[in-house]
Image (spheres, rainbow, N blue to C red):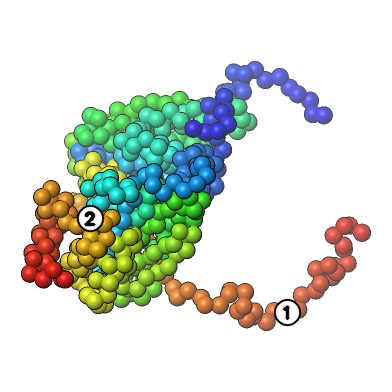
């Protein structure tokens, strides 16, 4: 029987907060900001695993922190939105409803479990104009904040926020907004406080396009992202990438025989598993 | 709503676990009452309690597929609806048409649309065309109990294959039977009570490598022939300007013919039949 030491509730909460904050600050950052044509979501991400995702017609998701934790929340968000949209109507799925569900869940996890989730989440809902856009920041302990048109999460979010606060303009075009996002993300993390210049391979970029009917979420990648980052010209709207879906794998001829019927490559004869060659039996005798 | 209430306010495990990418499978855990075919029916045949929709045709073209459906729903000898829409986009590259009990068909179609979109969002890739057809077959199979009691629904599924095995076959058509059997069709197919006549009409006209424009015309012709011989299929309604719903799926996505476009085609077909009633 281990000795139980007393720790005051305040102390427990403080420790958990500190643990979660440290975990979140270790990761790379993401920013979300409104612009004239919609909402831009940009994450610093060199992997193919995604930090930014579509949730529903007008709603996007961005997260930082532990991948497995925010991934399960992302799935939950998509599931909730789809159940609601299916049982009521597509127009009845709102960002606020999702933000509420996430705060409840994160709050409960924070108070009830040993280890809090090390995640920070943004739920973004695009409206018909920048004034009607909604950005919710949901933190590890289940608190939620309405953000004024821009937000930064993870890493050195404070410093990145300062850059955005100074220069964010809700009437800017996509190119300008993307440049600001890339610069803000690159303003920290360099050697000796130097700024970094991030290229298209280091960024995951998507928009919620307010002009689109139906599903507004579009990923921007490949050539159109390079063009936008270079800033030579704006990208025509049709090239903004497709919905959140890569094409499926190339089809192949379907096999006409059972896979089990194929000839096995000759393998070295294996010993009988019931008679292990090391002389030790499974039952320890 | 979730079955087992958790006072902590946390989402139930079903929502947050890695689980399945299928919306239908997810619903079986969370809200099975939202699924078609899961409701206990009283014994006996219930075929006549709800409207039926009928003829859908699909034609493969050089660029993809064309699908058309008439606008009539019937209850016994009554016309229940003159302007029901039985052909819908399943996602951005595929189309679904339904014949049979209209209410269940429309529900199945809505569910299928969410199913495809849900997979896309969760996985970040689109299902292959064969994968989509298989999912739909599974959903039809789930309705077998209701089908045995007369509430049968049979879809027709067609789409543009974005990564085909054979580049000359980008438009593909799949038909189903009540038991959830899945069959790929060559060239064209039709379902519903007028399908017999529609298919016979298409048999005489169809050839491989049709252009989309020709296929649209043939689809409307075939629906005209179906309406000619089947009371449950509605022909072009010139007085009310109600014409078939025709949609295409090509490399540029799905497209529904606008009112003006379909009116022009339908009026051409009707004018042609004034000269030659047999088409």
Both marks 1 and 2 on one chain:
no
**Label 1 is found on which chain of the structure?**
A
- Residue B207 on image: x %, y %: 25, 77
**Label 2 is found on which chain of the structure?**
B
| Within-10-Å neighbours for mark 2: few <14, some 14–19, many 20+ | many
Residue visible at 22% across and 35% down in the picture: A128
- Name the residue beneath numbered marker 1: A268
Q: Reply above or below: B63 against A199.
A: below
Q: Reply above or below: A280 against A59.
A: below
- Residue B116 on image: x %, y %: 40, 52
| Within-10-Å neighbours for mark 1: few <14, some 14–19, many 20+ | few
- Residue A241 on image: x %, y %: 28, 54
Locate residue A124: give its quadrant. Answer: top left
Label 1 to label 2, Cα distance in Å?
Answer: 69 Å
Residue visible at 47% across and 74% down in the picture: A254
Helix, strand or loop at disc 1?
loop
């Amino acid at each position: 029987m281990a000795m139980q030491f007393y720790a005051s509730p305040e102390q427990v909460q403080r420790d958990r907060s500190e643990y979660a904050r440290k975990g979140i600050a270790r990761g790379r950052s993401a920013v979300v900001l409104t612009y004239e044509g919609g909402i831009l979501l940009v994450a610093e991400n060199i992997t193919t695993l995604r930090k930014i995702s579509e949730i529903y017609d007008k709603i996007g998701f961005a997260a930082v922190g532990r991948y497995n934790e925010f991934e399960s929340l992302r799935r939950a968000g998509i599931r909730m939105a789809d159940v609601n949209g299916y049982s009521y109507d597509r127009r009845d799925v709102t960002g606020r409803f999702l933000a509420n569900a996430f705060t409840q869940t994160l709050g409960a996890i924070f108070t009830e479990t040993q280890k809090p989730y090390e995640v920070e989440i943004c739920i973004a809902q695009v409206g018909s104009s920048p004034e009607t856009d909604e950005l919710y920041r949901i933190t590890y302990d289940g608190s939620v904040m309405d953000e004024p048109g821009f937000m930064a999460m993870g890493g050195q979010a404070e410093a990145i926020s300062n850059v955005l606060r100074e220069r964010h303009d809700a009437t800017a075009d996509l190119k300008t907004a993307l440049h600001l996002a890339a610069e803000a993300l690159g303003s920290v993390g360099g050697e000796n406080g130097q700024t970094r210049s991030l290229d298209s391979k280091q960024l995951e970029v998507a928009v919620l396009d307010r002009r689109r009917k139906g599903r507004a979420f579009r990923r921007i990648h490949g050539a159109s992202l390079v063009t936008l980052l270079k800033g030579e010209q704006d990208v025509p709207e049709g090239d903004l990438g497709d919905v959140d879906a890569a094409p499926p794998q190339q089809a192949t001829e379907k096999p006409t025989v059972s896979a089990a019927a194929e000839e096995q490559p000759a393998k070295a004869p294996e010993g009988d598993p019931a008679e292990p060659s090391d002389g030790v039996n499974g039952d320890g005798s | 709503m979730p079955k087992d209430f958790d006072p902590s306010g946390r989402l139930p495990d079903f929502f947050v676990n890695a689980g399945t990418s299928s919306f239908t499978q997810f619903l079986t855990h969370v809200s099975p009452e939202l699924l078609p075919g899961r409701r206990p029916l009283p014994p006996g045949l219930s075929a006549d309690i709800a409207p039926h929709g009928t003829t859908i045709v699909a034609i493969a073209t050089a660029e993809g597929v064309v699908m058309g459906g008439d606008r009539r729903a019937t209850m016994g000898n009554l016309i229940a609806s003159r302007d029901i829409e039985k052909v819908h986009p399943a996602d951005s590259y595929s189309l679904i048409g339904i014949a049979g009990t209209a209410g269940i068909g429309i529900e199945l179609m809505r569910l299928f649309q969410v199913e495809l979109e849900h997979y896309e969002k969760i996985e970040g890739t689109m299902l292959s065309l064969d994968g989509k057809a298989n999912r739909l077959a599974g959903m039809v199979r789930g309705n077998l109990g209701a089908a045995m009691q007369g509430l049968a629904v049979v879809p027709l599924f067609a789409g543009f294959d974005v990564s085909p095995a054979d580049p000359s076959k980008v438009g593909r058509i799949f038909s189903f039977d009540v038991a959830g059997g899945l069959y790929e069709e060559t060239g064209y197919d039709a379902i519903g009570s007028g399908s017999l006549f529609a298919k016979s009409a298409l048999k005489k006209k169809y050839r491989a490598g049709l252009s989309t424009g020709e296929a649209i015309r043939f689809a409307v012709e075939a629906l005209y022939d179906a309406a000619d011989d089947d009371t449950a299929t509605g022909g072009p309604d010139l007085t009310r300007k109600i014409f078939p719903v025709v949609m295409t799926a090509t490399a540029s996505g799905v497209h529904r013919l606008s009112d003006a476009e379909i009116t022009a085609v339908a009026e051409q077909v009707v004018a042609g039949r004034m000269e030659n009633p047999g088409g």
